[in-house]
Image (spheres, grey):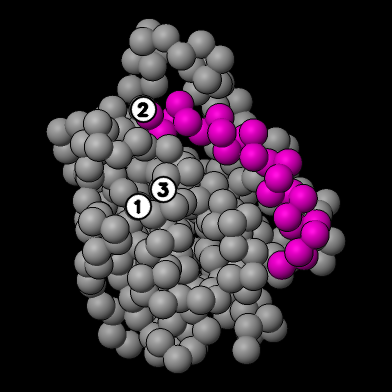
């Protein structure tokens, strides 16, 4: 298996992405979450590339993708989704499965709403789209949604600290020594770039638009009935197991599985998640 690390121009924006596998096989688009980038898939890509064409971009403002100034690019989930949509067009990806995690969920589900016929299957790994899945950990963020004052915005800066990144990676993991420091340290490096803090605060504030879209996404799931695998770290402090089970409300034959891990479940269970994905995708992709 060979992983390629490329950058492509998407309407003037330089988007970094990882790719592996035969381009003539079914495509799987991996969409990362906060505060990470495509490096979170470093262990999953080898699990999938033997059977599938795997593509994993970094979102604008994350990882190695360009970080435009906030005066030139408005950091909303709608705009992130538009960039990823154009990215798939530039790469010639016409139909593909999506793997959505954390922030990748509102991006991926917006793609599905805009281009439902492009989506062949959905794998949600702690990628929420139900109120049942939102934990109390979001309370400070919800306060900012309801009262977008500077004080409430500044109160969220703790989400950007190395201590919070460490918490996201290790909370709910049976043995923190199983979690490599590489991913979280790289995340902290990207978060520390000049101006990135304000970008991340913009996105935390805009997350309310994702919750507002839940009804539309659930209607899409009921109407289109895409194959769904919800495989979650059951100890996630942000998106709780009820959010995985809720997919069955709209896609009754959705597969729901849990692994004994936290939010960044790939750090400890990439092999198990990869095996579950291969089994799932083999039933639905040709």
Residue lying at 30% horizontally and 39% vertically, measured from the top left: 73
Q: Position of residue 161 (x, y in %)?
A: 29, 30
* Mark in front: 1 vs 3: 3
Q: Which residue is mark 1?
A: 59
* Image marks 1 and 3: residues in contact by CB distance under 8 Å: yes
The magenta-colored residue range is 202-226
Residue lying at 45% horizontally and 60% vertically, measured from the top left: 85
6 falls in the magenta region: no
* Mark in front: 2 vs 3: 3
Q: Secondary structure at mark 2?
A: helix
Report how far apart the C-alphas of labels 2 and 3 lie in the structure: 15 Å
Residue lying at 50% horizontally and 23% vertically, measured from the top left: 141
Residue lying at 36% horizontally and 27% vertically, measured from the top left: 201
Disc marking residue 80: 3
Q: Which residue is mark 2?
A: 201
Which one is nearer the viewer's eye here, 165 or 153? 153
* 84 in relation to 184, above or below: below
* Image marks 2 and 3: residues in contact by CB distance under 8 Å: no
**Is 42 on the left or on the right of 230, as rendered?**
left
The answer to whether residue 233 is seen in the rendering is no
Q: Position of residue 180 (x, y in %)?
A: 31, 56
214 falls in the magenta region: yes
């Amino acid at each position: 298996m060979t992983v390629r690390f490329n950058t492509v121009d998407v309407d003037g924006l330089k988007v970094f992405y990882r790719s592996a596998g035969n381009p003539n096989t079914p495509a799987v688009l991996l969409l990362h979450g906060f505060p990470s980038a495509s490096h979170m898939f470093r262990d999953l890509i080898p699990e999938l590339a033997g059977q599938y064409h795997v593509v994993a971009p970094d979102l604008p403002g994350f990882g190695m993708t360009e970080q435009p100034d906030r005066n030139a690019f408005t950091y909303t989930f709608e705009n992130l989704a538009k960039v990823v949509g154009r990215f798939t067009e530039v790469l010639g990806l016409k139909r593909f499965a999506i793997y959505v995690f954390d922030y990748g969920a509102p991006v991926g589900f917006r793609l599905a709403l805009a281009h439902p016929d492009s989506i062949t299957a959905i794998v949600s790994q702690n990628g929420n789209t139900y109120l049942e899945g939102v934990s109390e950990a979001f309370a400070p963020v919800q306060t900012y949604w309801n009262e977008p004052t500077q004080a409430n915005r500044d109160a969220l800066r703790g989400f950007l600290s190395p201590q919070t990144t460490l918490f996201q990676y290790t909370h709910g993991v049976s043995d923190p020594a199983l979690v490599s420091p590489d991913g979280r340290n790289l995340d902290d490096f990207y978060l520390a770039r000049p101006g990135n803090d304000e970008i991340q605060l913009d996105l935390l504030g805009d997350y309310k638009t994702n919750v507002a879209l839940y009804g539309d996404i659930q209607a899409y799931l009921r109407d289109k009935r895409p194959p769904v695998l919800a495989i979650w770290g059951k100890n996630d402090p942000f998106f709780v197991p009820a959010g995985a089970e809720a997919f069955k409300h709209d896609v009754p034959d959705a597969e729901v599985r849990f692994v004994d891990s936290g939010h960044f479940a790939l750090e400890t269970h990439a092999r198990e998640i990869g095996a579950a994905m291969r089994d799932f995708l083999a039933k639905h992709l040709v």
